[in-house]
Every structure is written in C-alpha cells, then in structure tokens.
Amino acid sequence: MQRYPILFLNGTSSSGKTTTCEAFQKLWAETTYYASNDKFIFMLPPHVLQSDELRPDALRPILSAFHQSLPHIAACGLPVIVDHVLESEHWLIECAMSLGDYDVREMPARRIGTPRARAR
C-alpha cells in the first residue's frame, strides 16, 4: 500500500483552513480524507463548548484522541489533509509523536482572501 504525505494545515480560527482543505479535496486526483479538529470538538454538547468552566477539561482529552487518531486515518491508504489550530506546544508534540513515521507537509494558514473569510 502506498504511503502518501500528510498535508497539515495549521492556523488561527477563520484563516481559511477549512475552505483550503475542501478545495484540496476537490482538486486532488485521488479520494482524500479530511481530518479536522473541529469534527472532534463538536462531538461535545453546546453547553460544554459555551462554558468557560467546562470546556478546557473536555477539550484536552478529545483533542488528544484526535491527535492519536491521525496515524490510524493515514494507515487507511489514502491521502490525508489535516485541519488544526495548534494552540499549545503540548498539542504540537502530540501530533509530532503520533505522525513521527509519516511524511508531514505543513502548510501554515494565514487569513487568506476566501469569500468565507472576507464575509466574517
């Protein structure tokens, strides 16, 4: 089975990562997986996400699970595009350790002029 490089987009919220990832998925000749930290975060109920008290303790383990899932997703044999906001050195270390056996190409996201970003 072929091992593809992992395209890793990291940037602040509203920098155009999701739009860029979706565009890559459409343009890539092969089917690709799109792994987003938001998909994991939004597994939590809205009342937890809106609570400054509850959110930090709930985010830590679910984002750790996201980081640990990345090599398993990559092992499925299709190209992977990762969308993340690495807010802490700990998250960066977890991702680096999880993906240490893979060729990861980082693409830092900056606020780009996508229609979605301009509308914000």
Image: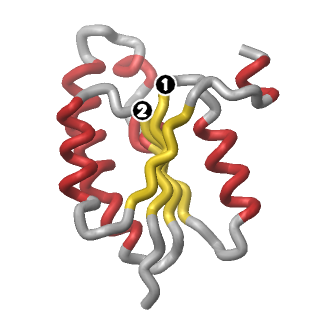
| 44 or 14, nearer to the observer | 14
| 28 or 50, nearer to the observer | 28
Q: Which mark is residue 85?
A: 2
Q: Secondary structure at mark 1?
A: loop
| Colour approach in the figure | secondary structure
Q: Please state the horizontal and vertical placement of residue 34, each as a whole percent of the image.
A: 54, 56
CA neighbours of label 2 inside 10 A, class few (<14), some (14 to 19), many (20+): some
* Residue drawn at the location 19% of the way across and 55% of the way down: 97
**Amino acid residing under circle 1:** Thr
* Residue drawn at the location 27% of the way across and 49% of the way down: 95
CA neighbours of label 1 inside 10 A, class few (<14), some (14 to 19), many (20+): some
Q: Residue furthest top?
A: 52
Q: Please state the horizontal and vertical placement of residue 15, each as a whole percent of the image.
A: 59, 27
- Residue 16: quarter of image: top right
Q: Which mark is residue 12?
A: 1
In the picture provided, is 7 more to the left or to the right than 65? right
The quarter of the rendered structure image containing the N terminus is bottom left
